[in-house]
Image (tube, rainbow, N blue to C red):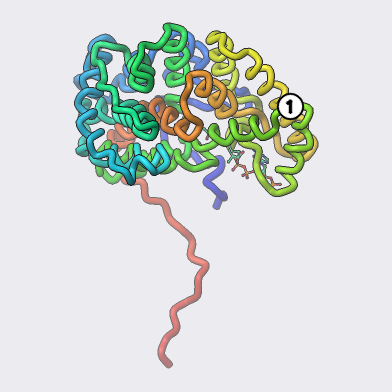
Amino acid sequence: MTEGLENVVAAETVLSEVDGAAGRLVIRGALVEDLARHVRFAGMVHLLFDGFFAELPDEATLARRLGEARVAVFADVAALDAKLIAAPPIEAIRALSARLPDGDDLATALRLLAAPAVFTAAHARARAGLRPVVPDARLDHAADILRMMRDAPAAAEEIAALDAYLVTVSDHGLNASTFAARVVASTRAGLTSAVIAGLSALKGPLHGGAPGPVIEMLDAIGDPDNARAWLEAALRRGERLMGFGHRIYRVRDPRADALKQAVRRLQRNAGRLAHAEAIEAAALAILRERKPDRSLETNVEFYTALLLEALAFQPDAFTCVFAMGRTIGWIAHAREQLASGKLIRPQSRYHGPEPLRAA
Ligand code: ACO
């Protein structure tokens, strides 16, 4: 048995390929860095859903129907009570999403795509004592997310940066949350159940919960001259450096550079980017010294943190923004799994005691 199913192929897919040796991510025949520059959210939905929904409309119609779905799920913002407002954003978003009806059709899928966008904005505003902003169905998804967060239109370059992020993280082979979504989909429980499983797996700090702690790390280090001492102390305490290392990539995660370019194009706070680059260089040097046998490189979460911070998302909501993009992949994988018709049900090997038999 392989610990953590490392190197085990557990699904056949036409959706994406993660080449860990070459540092290459292909999503439906295109390189992630090209998609990040040229495709918007609805275009990515179209690309990943193509072939998995019989009635899939063109990109413009999808964008419009996604807008209508945002308006429809906004009704559930009323369920945001004091307990959920006080909860971590990802838990509040999961609880609200779990209220959505289950199903396997495109309408269910669009509601599930709309949910993290609408609920994350409403939760952030509620925590700040502000009223939620009603979605505008006419806007593109990324533009409306930023508008719902701020109650003001976002600049074109900010919308482009958020689109680049959501597209970059939309799918990534059989990562932990996608596997969880496929397992649930294989039981024929429905897309909502599959997406809730994906959200739950994404929440963990070894998966989608890392970028918030990246900001904490950058802030705690402060002056890059302190980086070596701070990072070595963290490793001595047995901690992992957030934003580094990956199960599959043995070279740099291609998404890290796609996002770094998106941060650069945004042209906000160049000082913060230089600060992060200096700390990244120190961390990579220390990881090479401390773990010479394990190639630990920068992963997607490091520059995710910088990009989402520049767009004024709160660090504890970064995982929710990740979910806004990854839900596209979860749904496509769930539909692909469903089409295979096979229940995922592996085996375990028992090492416990044998039952005692009466003499
Ligand atoms: N910092 C320090 N040491 C690390 C790190 C890290 N970021 N990542 C791995 N290691 C070390 C481990 O301590 C272990 O060392 P050991 O063999 O001396 O015990 C060795 O490298 C292998 O670690 P594993 O956990 O077996 O490797 P795995 O492939 O399972 O880990 C993971 C991948 C979980 C992402 C890991 O690199 C990690 O914890 N990184 C930090 C969290 C993070 O950035 N998560 C986001 C990942 S990207 C995503 O999911 C979207």
Residue 330 visible (yes or no): no
State the SS at label 1. loop
- Ligand 1 lies in quarter: top right
Residue on which the image places disc 1: 223
Which quadrant would residue 216 be assigned to in this image?
top right
Q: Residue furthest bottom?
A: 359
- Vertical order, 47 against 242 (above or below): above
Total labels: the figure holds 1
Q: Is residue 305 above or below residue 202?
A: above
Q: Residue 316, image x and y in percent?
A: 48, 35
Q: Residue at x 52, y 23 (%)?
A: 309
For the C terminus, which image quadrant? bottom left
Horizontally, residue 80 falls left or right of residue 218, namely left
Q: Residue at x 29, y 12 (%)?
A: 139
Residue at 65% x, 42% y is 240
Q: Position of residue 348 (x, y in %)?
A: 46, 58
Pinpoint residue 260: horizontal percent, then vertical percent.
Answer: 59, 17
Instruction: Specify whether residue 143 is in view.
Output: yes
Write the residue at 48% across / 29% down.
314
How would you rate the neighbour count of disc 1 (Cα within 10 Å): few for under 14, some for 14-19, many for 20 or more? few
Occupied quadrant, residue 206: top right
Residue 84 appears left or right of 347: left
Dot 1 amino acid type: Asp
In this view, the residue in front, 40 or 308, is 308
Q: Nearer the viewer, residue 167 or 188?
A: 167
